[in-house]
Image (cartoon, rainbow, N blue to C red):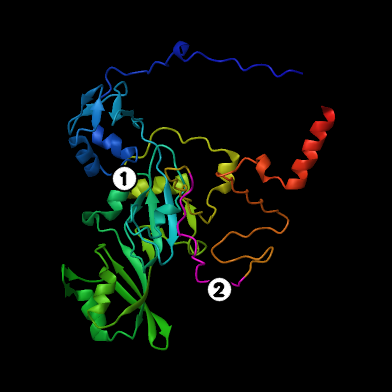
Amino acid sequence: MARPFKQQRDPRAASTRPVAIDPDAPTQRLHKLLALSGLGSRREMETLIASGRITINGEVAIVGAGVLPSDIVRLDSRPLRLPFEAELPKVLIYHKPEGEIVTQDDPEKRATVFDKLPHIKGARWVAIGRLDMNTSGLLIFTTSGELANYFMHPRYEVEREYAVRIFGELTEEQLLQLTQGIELEDGPASFDVIHPLGGEGSNHWYKVVLREGRNREVRRLFESLQLPVSRLMRVRFGPINLPPRVKRGQMLELEPKEVIGLLEWAGLEVPRAPLRQRTAREIESASKVFTPKERKEPARRSSAGRTALAEPAADNSSAPKNARRRVGEHIPGSRPTPASKPTSKPRKPVATNRRVRQTSDLNEPAQQKRSDKTRGRG
């Protein structure tokens, strides 16, 4: 049976669906909608608008401009879909192992936490807080710039709890000193809570809680007392604890009800729109711990169209001259040749100085024999 042809649709005949607009609807701030769409924080969006890259109905937008659902907003001539009706953001928990850095662009091409994040359409992941390369534990990602800002802004003083292992043991005087305050290079710092958790030998564990996230603050506080930190792990950030079932390198996405609880805790607006109906597969995979897969970068191609190799082949010029390659034998730096694959024969060189054979080159008996035959014919 012949396969019927698929009917082609004329794109010019496709009509756009009209947008229902409330004439009395108030305008919304452009930088707020851009932040809700996951492009960045509100302050970053104000800087983006001031750069002149955002247009509203073909005109360059200004900071503080308001927009309606009927307006066409573009970023570098690319249309943007703005969330006039706020959608429920996503929140992801990651148990960061040591050896990864929290950045999206590393010039040294080291392993980053963003290399393993699942892809989302129409939004981007924002890391809530940072952990240095040698620190492990709880790291939170979200698609809401407002929620991330509430966690990280110093004025909200969100608690951060760490488990610290040091080489040595704190005295009562040192415990009191760490809670009262120690003068560091960037100002005084202290722990709100410090509690011993025991230990073995010369290594002891401590639980510490503080309300700010300065660079390497926990390590610097212990190093000021000549007590180096051998291991540092964040176990809680605000109301979110690191679940014991989430092992190193694993992730967990929070349920919609848990995300709503976070928005209410932060005093942020909860979307009024009903929650999107989830599929059976999404419900089954919800609250399941998973191990992310690292993204593979596409192979770079040279101008000749061939894949550029990362390292050149090894030079075998130092090999002995009498070393012969056997069939099926692999030489380091070269591709192995299977024994069953015949090698192509070399072409014969083409002679450029070929000489035409003449009768003078023939031997004498042949000339005599030829003359006799000529006489007989005559």
Residue at the spot 52% in from the left edge and 35% down from the top edge: 277
- Position of residue 73 measured from the top left corner of the image (x, y, whole percent): 29, 27
Residue at the spot 16% in from the left edge and 67% down from the top edge: 186
Q: In this view, does 247 lie above or below 8?
A: below
Quarter where residue 179 is shown: bottom left
Indicate whether residue 320 is drawn in magenta.
Answer: yes
- Position of residue 218 measured from the top left corner of the image (x, y, whole percent): 28, 71
Asked whether the viewer can see residue 192, the reply is: no
- Position of residue 360 measured from the top left corner of the image (x, y, whole percent): 66, 43
Read off the magenta span.
306-323
- Callout 2 secondary element: loop
* Image quarter hosting the N terminus: top right
Mark 1 highlights which residue? 145
* Image quarter hosting the C terminus: top right
Quick one: 101 or 298, which is closer to the camera? 298
Residue at the spot 46% in from the left edge and 44% down from the top edge: 119
Q: In this view, does 329 lie above or below 180?
A: above
Quick one: 85 or 363, which is closer to the camera? 363
Quick one: 33 or 206, which is closer to the camera? 33
Indicate whether residue 84 is drawn in magenta.
Answer: no
Mark 2 highlights which residue? 320
Quarter where residue 53 is shown: top left
Q: How far apart are marks 1 and 2 (CA)?
A: 65 Å
First in sequence: mark 1 or mark 2?
Answer: 1
Q: Main secondary structure of the magenta part?
A: loop
Amino acid beneath label 2:
Pro
- Callout 1 secondary element: helix
Asked whether the viewer can see residue 299, the reply is: yes
Q: In this view, does 70 lie above or below 376?
A: above
The local crowd at label 2, few if under 14, some if 14 to 19, many if 20 or more residues have their Cα within 10 Å, is few
